[in-house]
Amino acid sequence: EGNPELRLEYKQRLGQSRIQIRANGDLGVDRYERSNGGDQDAAAGGLRVLYIDPDDDQAFAPFVEYAPKYLFDPTFSRVAERRHNIAFGFEKSFNFDGAFSPVAPRPDTSNDTVWAFGFSAKLQRRFDDLVPSSYAVYLTPSVTWSISDRWNLNWETNLVRRFHDVAAGQHRRDWIIESALTVEYKLPPEWFGGQDVAERLGAPALDFQVSHNRVSSNAAGRGYSQWTVGPVLKTSWKF
C-alpha cells in the first residue's frame, strides 16, 4: 500500500480575544498492490473556531466546526462522493511533567510537558450525496509521551456512533472504532549536514505506526476490520 499525503495547517488567535481559528487542507492518495476497486484519492478541509482561555492551554475549549471531504476515482479523475460535516463539541487536555506532577496552567506548557492526556467530544451532522446523510457522536481520547528530544509516542482512538437517515425503509446504525499507535523518531540534523539544512528539508521524522479500524453495522455487508502497519516519513515546515 502507498499513501502519500499533503497537509496544510493554520492556527491563529483573533487579536486579544478568546477566539482561535484553526484551519487545514489535505490531499491524499491511496494505492494498493491488490486494490479490488479500493484505490481512491481524497481532498478534505476543516475550519474549527474555538473559545479558548489564552492563559491556559489545557483549559476546556468549546468549538464549532465545518469539514468538507471529496472522494475521487484514481488520479482525481471523477468525484465519487461529497461529504459536508458540521459539528460542535469541546476539547480538554491534562499535562504532566516527568515526575507525573500536573503542569501549572500557562499560555504554553509544551516545554514542561512529558505526558499529555487529551479528550475531545463532538456531535456531528453529515450531508452525503452517495449514502444517506447521518448524525454521529465522536469521543476521542489520546495520550502523548515525550520520551526524549528525539522520541515520542502517541496513541489516539476515535469511538464513533453513527445514525444514518432512513432510506428504503432501513435505519442504518454503525459503531466505528479507529485507533492508531505511533512511535516517532526525529532524525538527527547531523544526518543532513546540520540544523539549517534539516530545517530546510522539513525536519524529517520517521513514524512507526500501527492502526486498526473496525466497523460494526446493522446493515448487511457494511462491517469490516482492517489493520495497517508500516513506517511513515514525515516532513513539515512552519511559516
Image (cartoon, rainbow, N blue to C red):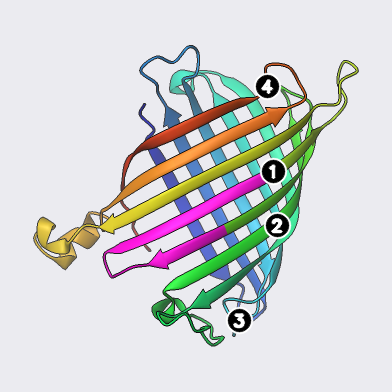
Q: Quadrant of the N terminus?
A: top left
Could you tell which of marks 4 and 3 lies nearer the N-terminus?
3
Secondary structure beneath dot 1 equals strand
Residue designated by label 3: 54
Residue designated by label 2: 121
**Res 45 quadrant in image:** top right
Q: Position of residue 114 (x, y in %)?
A: 41, 74
- Check contact, mark 4 vs mark 3: CB within 8 A: no
Q: Position of residue 24 (x, y in %)?
A: 53, 51
Vertical placement of 143 versus 95: above or below? above
Q: Label 4 sits on what residue type? A: Arg
Q: What's drawn in magenta, residue-wise?
A: 142-159
Can residue 148 be found in the magenta stretch?
yes
Vertical placement of 158 versus 101: above or below? above
Secondary structure beneath dot 2 equals strand
Q: Residue at x 44, y 15 (%)?
A: 35
Q: As drawn, is 196 to the left or to the right of 165?
A: left
Label 1 to label 3, Cα distance in Å?
Answer: 30 Å
Q: Residue at x 52, y 76 (%)?
A: 95
Label 3 to label 2, Cα distance in Å?
Answer: 21 Å
Label 3: how many residues lie within 10 Å, few (<14), some (14-19) or many (20+)?
A: some
